């Protein structure tokens, strides 16, 4: 695969990571994976900034909201698009994620078509900013 777009999928479910990785591969992303937020930060330290992060909310060690806040506090990741992909459907949770710096929010279960649409919206909004 010859791609310059990279992504990280952070979710404590291996099955969910696999599903999202396959979907991103079809969209020409090179994909890294992590099982929780701290592992995600460690991966970013190794591979450098990526174009996209798909982040679950409820995970052990470091949850998705803490990951978003940590990444948004680091200027070297300011161009990274972050999409929360989670089962948290409470409007207050969605608002908290967006205020913390997530670009888009998708509620599980998510289809490849829904993910592609969310990525399009997130990319468009990050270009506006």
Image: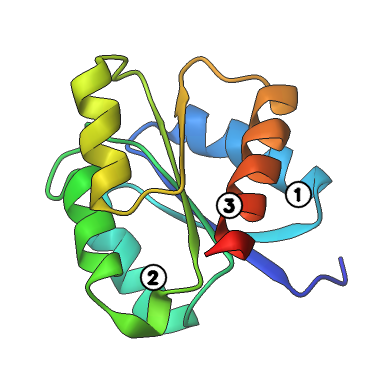
Residue depicted at 57% across the width and 20% down the height: 110
Query: Where does label 3 land, which residue?
Result: 125
* Whole-number angstrom distance, CA of label 3 to CA of label 2: 25 Å
Q: Are marks 2 and 1 in contact (CB under 8 Å)?
A: no
Q: Considering the numbered disc 3 on the image, is that residue within a helix, a strand or a loop?
A: helix
Q: Considering the numbered disc 1 on the image, is that residue within a helix, a strand or a loop?
A: helix
Residue depicted at 41% across the width and 76% down the height: 77
Image location of residue 68, percent across then percent down: 28, 55
Q: Along the horizontal axis of the image, is 99 left or right of 87? A: left
Image location of residue 118, percent across then percent down: 62, 35
Where's the N terminus, which quadrant? bottom right
Query: Where does label 2 land, which residue?
Result: 43
In-front residue for pair 78/62: 78
Query: Where does label 1 land, which residue?
Result: 25
Q: Name above or below for residue 51 compared with residue 90.
A: below
Q: Along the horizontal axis of the image, is 2 left or right of 8? A: right
* Whole-number angstrom distance, CA of label 2 to CA of label 1: 18 Å
């Amino acid at each position: 695969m010859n791609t310059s777009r990279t992504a990280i999928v952070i979710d404590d479910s291996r099955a969910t990571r696999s599903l999202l990785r396959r979907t991103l591969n079809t969209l020409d992303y090179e994909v890294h994976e992590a099982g929780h937020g701290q592992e995600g930060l460690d991966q970013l330290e190794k591979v450098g900034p990526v174009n996209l992060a798909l982040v679950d909310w409820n995970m052990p060690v470091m949850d998705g909201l803490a990951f978003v806040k940590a990444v948004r506090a680091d200027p070297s990741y300011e161009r990274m698009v972050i999409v929360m992909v989670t089962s948290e459907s409470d409007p207050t949770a969605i608002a908290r994620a967006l205020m913390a710096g997530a670009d888009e929010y998708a509620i599980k279960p998510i289809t490849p078509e829904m993910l592609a649409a969310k990525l399009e919206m997130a990319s468009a909004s990050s270009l506006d900013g």
